[in-house]
Structure formats: C-alpha cells, structure tokens
Amino acid sequence: MIKLLDLNWQYRSIRQEIDDAIHAVIEESGFIGGKHVREFEQAFASFVGTKHCVGVANGTDALEIAIEALELPPQSEIIVPGNSFIASAEAVTRAGHRVVFCDCNETDYCLEPKDVARRITRRTKAIVAVHLYGHPADMAAIDELAHAHGLQVIEDCAQAHGAEFRGRQVGTMGRIAAFSFYPGKNLGAYGDAGAIVTNDDALALRCRMIGNHGRVAKYNHEFEGRNSRLDGIQAAILAVKLRHLKDWTSRRIEVARYYFQRLEGCSGMVLPKVRPGARHVFHLFVIRTERRDALQGYLEAEGVQTGIHYPISLPKLKAYASHGMADEAMRVNQYDGEVLSLPMGEHLSDREVELVASVILEFFRDRSVE
Ligand SMILES: *Cc1c(COP(=O)(O)O)cnc(C)c1O
C-alpha cells in the first residue's frame, strides 16, 4: 500500500530524538508553559521570520484568537475562500463576525483577488488569505485590495510551513498569521497544537493573554480570555521536528517534480501549477479530473491511497446553508467534485512515486481507448 501520508515512517526516522525530548519534559514536569514552549516559540518565530510566536492549543484556535485580537467591530464581514478546511471560516464566526465566501482561481486554487474585490462592502473588515495545499496565495494582489479598502489580512498558514511568495515567507506578509501543527501537517505535533505569528508587539501580547485567561502573570486577569495553550510535550516534539523540516520540504518538492515530469501532457487531468515567484511546499499534490471518482477507485485497487481536499466546498456545507451560496456558479462549487490528492511526503521512495505516476498514466490510456 502506498500511503497518502505516513507518520509512522517519519517517527521511525527520528525515534531517538523524539523519545529523548518527550522524556526530558516528563522528567522536568514541564507540562504547561516553561522552557520547552519558550524555546520552540523562539525557534519557530526565527524560522518564519517574525518578531513573535505565540503557541496555542491548535490551528483553529490560532485563527480565532488572532481574529479576536484584531478587535474588529462585532459582526464585521470577513472574506474567506470557499475551498478550505472549515476552520478558516469557523474561526470568523466564533470570533463574532460574518463569513463571506469568495472563489478561488484556477491556477493555484487560492483565493481569486478579482472575486474578493467584488465582495467587499462597507462592512468588510478583513480577508483570511489561506495558503492552500502549500501554495502561497497571491499576497501582492491581496495586499493591494487591503490597502485600498483598509482591510486587515489574516494569513492561514496551516498548510504552508515554509512556503514563500516573491522571497517572503508565509506568515510575514499579513498583519497576523495562524499555523496548525495538526499531526498530518508539514510540521505536525503528536496531538493538537498551533501558533500565531506577528511582528506587532501589542497584538502578540493580546493573543498570549486571550489564550491564557486574560493574564500575563499568575492571577492578574485583566479580562476574560480562555484556555488555549501549547503544551510542553508538543513543543518539545515540534522543536525536534522543526530541525528536519527543511529536508522534508525539499523531499516534498522533489516528489512533486517527479510527478510533474511523469504526468506532464497526460490528457484528461490538470496538474497543479506553481505561480512565478511562488515557493510551493506541497502539503498536498492535488490534481483535477472529471473522472475523479473512477481514478480514485482505480488507484485504490492498485494499492495507492489518495484523498480529497475537500469533498464538499464550504458554501455547500450544511453549516453554511443559511449563507445561500451553495448554488452560486463558483469554481469552488465545481472543483470539489474533481480534485484528488496524490500520495505526498518524505516517506515516498522514488520507486513508489514512479508507481503512482504509471498507474495514473495507465488509467487515462485505458480510458482513451474505450
Ligand atoms: C488544518 C487546518 C486548520 C486548522 O488547524 P487545526 O490545528 O486542525 O485546528 C485551519 N486551516 C486550514 C487551511 C487547515 O488545513
């Protein structure tokens, strides 16, 4: 079986380092806060290139706390791409605002600036720029819109650790950014974990206080916050894995290059595109075909695991039925029936990537004869 993702393979490759890190936290009882959390926060801020990193309990909280910290007027409209994981939209509603979905473009599947522009009203206060599948959103165009209309930009970097747009890393281009360290992400913990990054001192402090009951010291609660903290064990694991991220990302890019070489020109499907000036870190390698379900079944029968991200666009979800956008003629409402995620990650050998590619070529060759 060729897996879409193989976390056990990764653990086996760094077992001793991980085991030592976990034991150190337990020996020191450094479960909440403390040195392991501080060290990881510093290392991650330095990796991204921001002044601050605030560890939180998960990526959804990172988004929600980041939006809350911006202190926008209640029920502001915030534009969110219609193709993402629900958390990108959920955080907006949970923070007391209104989700307005926008379309994606057909190049990189990130939000389409022209469609964002169309949806801006007097009540619009922010844009959630999701760097989907590991490809950076078009931050130049988004920045231009934000400036023209006085909007805040929140980057959702949950799928894009280390991705770049015109030489700048994701997480450094908006006012504030959220990362997820869900186990399957490019940098994943051994449980839930997330982080907020920003260059803004006051925003960073506010995020830290929101996630820690509205306080900085032990019992001086200045307002009501909540409990959303990165724990010591996850921080120690993430610190170990952060040291390997560069190599793992290079391998992802190599695997992608191999898929591109082998599948280029294969008719019946659309390969992902990398925009000029973008560094795509391939959290997912997503192809598009009208025969998606048949191809997925064919790959499955040949022992190749695939995924669908996402099978139902956000506007079509029951959770957003009241928005009435399920039937809008948007790409996001069509692509959910066509996208397929191929196996991707540092666990794949050249031979396995070759096998996946040849099964796909075989599928489309067989079909064209019919
Ligand atoms: C995973 C993900 C999140 C949420 O992160 P969690 O850590 O699972 O809460 C948010 N946005 C996107 C685009 C994601 O892929």
Image (tube, helix red, strand yellow):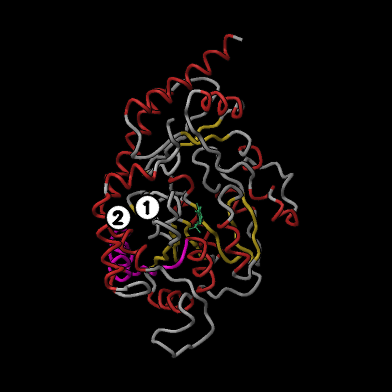
Q: Which quadrant holds the N terminus?
A: top left
Residue 153 x/y as whole percent: 50, 62
- When the figure is inspected, residue 218 is found, relative to residue 366, above or below; the finding is below
Three-letter amino acid code at disc 1? Answer: Leu
Q: CA distance from mark 1 to mark 2?
A: 7 Å
Task: Count neighbours of disc 2 (C-alpha within 10 A) and say few if under 14, some if 14 to 19, many if 20 or more.
Answer: some
Which residue appears at 58% of the width and 43% of the height?
Answer: 310
- In this view, the residue in front, 188 or 303, is 303
Q: Which quadrant holds the C terminus?
A: top right
Three-letter amino acid code at disc 2? Answer: Leu
Residue 308 position by quadrant: top right
* In magenta segment, residue 52: yes
Q: Is the residue indicated by label 2 positioned so its CB lies within 8 Å of ligand 1?
A: no
Residue 97 x/y as whole percent: 63, 68
Secondary structure, mark 1, is loop
Left or right: 322 with respect to 337?
Answer: right
- In this view, the residue in front, 246 or 49, is 246
Residue 320 position by quadrant: bottom right
Provide the residue designation for mark 1.
Answer: 187
Task: Count neighbours of disc 1 (C-alpha within 10 A) and say few if under 14, some if 14 to 19, many if 20 or more.
Answer: many
Magenta range: 37-58
Provide the residue designation for mark 2.
Answer: 242
Q: Are marks 1 and 2 in contact (CB under 8 Å)?
A: yes
Residue 338 position by quadrant: top right
Left or right: 46 with respect to 219?
Answer: left
First reached walking from the N terminus: tag 1 or tag 2: 1
Residue 278 x/y as whole percent: 38, 44
Which residue appears at 60% of the width and 58% of the height?
Answer: 89
* In magenta segment, residue 368: no
Which residue appears at 34% of the width and 38% of the height?
Answer: 347
